[in-house]
Image: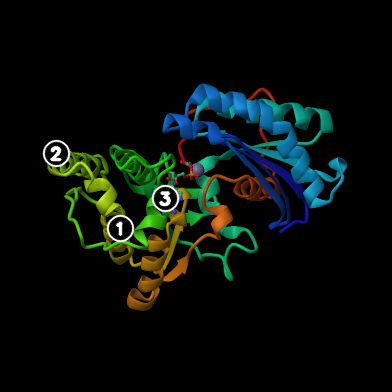
Amino acid sequence: MSDSIILGIESSCDDTSAAIIKGNCILSNIAANQAIHKEYGGVVPELASRAHQQNIIPVVEKSITKANIQQNAISAIGFTRGPGLLGSLLVGTSFAKSLAMSLNVPLIEVNHLQAHILAHFIDDANPMPPQFPFLCLTVSGGHTMIVLVKDYFDMEIIGKTIDDAAGEAFDKIGKIFDLDYPAGPIIDRLAKEGNPDAFTFNKPRMENYDYSFSGIKTSVLYFIQKEVRKNPDFIKENLNDLCASVQRTIIEILMAKLEKAAKELNIKEVAIAGGVSANSALRKVMEDNHEKLGWNIYIPKFEYTTDNAAMIAMVAQLKFERGEFTDLRTSATAKYDL
Ligand code: KG4
Ligand code: ZN
């Protein structure tokens, strides 16, 4: 891999992030989270774009300072072109275009989902990078899918959710429990003190490698409504057990299809990616499957799980080597297939 220095910019949802990569080593990876959305129980697109607008300059400046490089050492600018919230994407895209123009360096568009997967090729992401072909369970707030990764830029979605994403299920169920947004990490923490077998929730019956998560949300909602009628303190008194049981169910749903795919396609290289891959119980099941099923597992470092610009810079580096540049007349796109 070349030693070029590239700036990556991520602004697809509610994190403004900038990273500097040299070869496949991350020199800096800065993010500004937007606490404002907590008050609304979810990301408010309009507020997200405004916050990106305020954060982008300080975040990029900090990434350059922290990397200890001069601006003129940057060989290209990578940016998230999609998928994501259009207003948010526009901020990062416009900024990347202008900076590429003023520094007179190539602009490189990055698909956010590819970036979650290719984060595994950052030098300190894994002791060894995954071997092609590998399976990657990509689970975030907006997406849930099993991807067959045949090469860096040759990916096939073999299964996906037909409704909610797994992260969305964590967040929406957390809302029923009156937890802050995003509830995924909170459920993870509370579940550690709870009994995962305390409650049982319905699991969907889906064809092939597809998922559905709207059913479990409804099943939890009805169950809670029924119990709260009998005991108004039901959630408070059972919160840890509720979190542990919901988490177990979501992970069982995720893993059943991943195990089916690995078995049927006879692939033992198995990775996870995306915000939900930060989940400690999911990471533990992956480790168990290394023992039980002989999988070579790839679990991203914590800082490369949720949205970050390091993964964007990684993809930009791979594209830079291939000479895949983007015309400055490009625009952001809310939908962007793998
Ligand atoms: O990849 P990401 O940062 O943003 C999207 O591209 O969507 O993923 C965010 C999602 C949220 O739904 C959040 O609740 C979930 O990842 N998440 C977790 C954990 N950390 C983040 N879900 C379960 N357990 C966690 N530890
Ligand atoms: Zn993401």
Between marks 1 and 2 in the image, the one whose residue lies nearer the viewer: 2
| Left or right position of 30 against 182 | right
As displayed, is residue 320 above or below residue 294?
above
From the viewer's perspective, is residue 321 above or below residue 86? below
The residue positioned 43% from the left and 39% from the top of the image is 181
Query: Which callout, 3 or 2, points at the residue further toward the start of the chain?
Result: 3
On whether ligand 1 comes within 8 Å of the CB at mark 3, the answer is no
- For disc 2, the marked residue is 229
The disc placed on residue 244 is 1
Q: Residue at x 44, y 51 (%)?
A: 185
Q: In what element is the residue under mark 2?
A: helix
Q: Position of residue 300 (x, y in %)?
A: 52, 59
Q: 33 or 178: which is nearer to us?
A: 178
Contact between labelled residues 1 and 3, with CB atoms less than 8 Å apart: no
Q: CA distance from mark 3 to mark 2?
A: 25 Å
Of labels 3 and 1, earlier in sequence is 3
Residue at numbered disc 3: 186
Other-residue count near label 3 (Cα within 10 Å), few / some / many at <14 / 14–19 / ≥20: some
The amino acid pointed to by label 1 is: Ala
The answer to which quarter of the image holds residue 303 is bottom right
Q: Tell me the crowding category of disc 1: few under 14, some 14 to 19, or many 20 or more residues within 10 angstroms, Cα based.
A: many
Q: Nearer the viewer, mark 3 or mark 2?
A: 2
Evaluate whether residue 335 shows in this view: no
Mark 3 lies on a secondary structure that is helix
The answer to which of 185 and 326 lies nearer the viewer is: 185
Residue 272: which numbered mark, if any? none
